Amino acid sequence: MVAKKSKVLEKKIFTDSEFLVKRIYQKSSKKKPIEDAGTYPYTRGIHPEMFRERFWTMRQYSGFGDAKLTNQRFKFMLEKGQTGLSMAFDLPTQIGYDSDSPQAEGEVGKVGVSITSIKDMMTAFDGIPLGKVSSSMTINSTASTLLAYYIVVGESQGFKSNELRGTTQNDILKEYIARNTYIYPPQPSMRLIGDMIEYCAEKVPSWYPVSISGYHMREAGCTATQEVAFTLANAIAYIQTCLDKGLKIDDFAPRLSFFFCCTIEFFEEVAKFRVARKVYAKIMKEMFHAKNSRSLQLKFHTQTSGESLTAQQPNNNIARVTIQTMAAVAGGTQSLHTNSRDEALALPTQESAKIALRTQQIVAHESGITKTADPLAGSYYLEELCDQIEDGVWNYLKKIQKMGGSVKAIEKGFFQSEIRQNAYRLKKEIDANERILVGVNKYS
């Protein structure tokens, strides 16, 4: 008697990026080179020892109300063991309005701190020695102004600009794609970013003048493959802008950085990070002929997915963020922000922010995931996901280059259309209960 096929076996299962998932994975017929962490193309990590030697920077994103309140939150988080600062700005600051501007009414101090002067910046960092802590500023259109403020504050504390460490996001291309807090058209904005990269290379050499971001595109609805491809396409545009200014690739490329999202699709996210490092290294070596090994290394910050967190049963979000944290660490992130359980409801309370930080600390000290570099390498499932994502990334990059690069693709609406289509698919799956959100469409 022949046994009937199980309904489960007949059902096709896909990852978030719509890769068909097999029942079981076997050893691939592809012969892959066995590479070490810290060696080209850095698939397994940019450092030989990875977290055996030093943990990632625990950089919680903070900022609300006025500069004094933000200063208090910074100090609270540093006291709890945070190892880097990350500054959130309100919308008026992001698009260049003073807090007393009529256009800023109702938005001052919401979703970030209001900074309208050097005095505000001094208050925000009062009692925090800028030469001894690295700071990330999530600011784009007005990044050059906020960096100038930061340098002045550092100098007032007795630190020279070449002693300051940190990052300005300064990624205007993703603003046209996913966020819309831009001021100028693409071409003059690109010129300004090129000027800032040049200035930092000469005057603030330990600063990352741009953090090329896939995070906002992923939160808007793109797939893991699209996140890597679109981010690297934007990176190519920034690099070409700098080269067109007459800069040499190895003079500025070591200080380019990246920013990715980490969702709850654990294996796909780990694969995504590995592929991003590999493809970037090949772009830098083969397209731009970089010689300095640091120019080839993709250095990235990760934030867990805010879009994945729910207003319903918010304590469930602690579990979601923990899984995302494990994926970011297994994927080799250089710094990490873990979202708070109340992300979908409001700015985090001190208790929620502390739990989010403790999540990182528990993963770092107790999980064992940091005891070896690239702990999931060799998994048949993971390695096949890497192959699939890499193929998709290269296909997208070729398509975008044929359009004339990122700026042309943005003007044609290509990125926006691709993201919109996938976001619509995801929403339909949730509404049809094909994609389960615990506490939302099941177990409510």
Image (cartoon, helix red, strand yellow):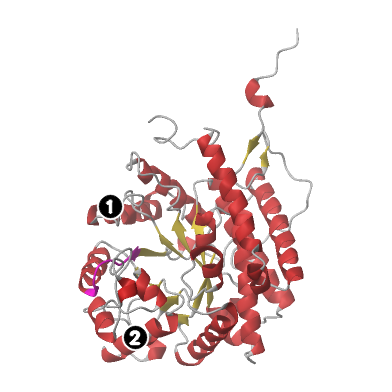
| Mark drawn on residue 123 | none
- Indicate whether 121 appears above or below 1: below
Query: In the drawing, does residue 352 fall left or right of residue 243?
Result: left
Q: Circles 2 and 1: CB distance less than 8 Å?
A: no
Q: Is 279 one of the magenta-colored residues? A: no
| Mark drawn on residue 352 | 1
Quarter of the picture containing the C terminus is: top left
User: Could you tell me residue 244's position as x and y percent?
Assistant: 66, 88
Gap in angstroms between the C-alphas marked 2 and 1: 30 Å
Q: Earlier in the sequence, mark 2 or mark 1?
A: 2
Crowd class of label 1 (few under 14; some 14 to 19; many from 20; radius 10 Å):
some
Q: Is there any visible trace of residue 372 in the rendered image?
A: no
The kind of residue on which mark 1 rests is Ser
Which residue is at 56% across, 44% downward?
426
Element at label 1: helix
User: Could you tell me residue 3's position as x and y percent?
Assistant: 71, 13
Which residue is at 43% across, 80% downward?
143
- Tell me the magenta residue range: 61-67
Considering every residue shown, the one lying at the far front of the view is 102
User: Could you tell me residue 11's position as x and y percent?
Assistant: 66, 28
- Indicate whether 422 appears above or below 90: above
On the image, which quarter does residue 228 sit in?
Answer: bottom right
User: Could you tell me residue 394's position as x and y percent?
Assistant: 72, 62
Which residue is at 34% across, 69% downward?
90
Q: Is there any visible trace of residue 354 in the rendered image?
A: yes
Residue matched to label 2: 149
Element at label 2: helix
Which residue is at 59% across, 59% downward?
227
Frontmost of labels 2 and 1 is: 2
Quarter of the picture containing the N terminus is: top right
Query: In the drawing, does residue 254 fall left or right of residue 387?
Result: left
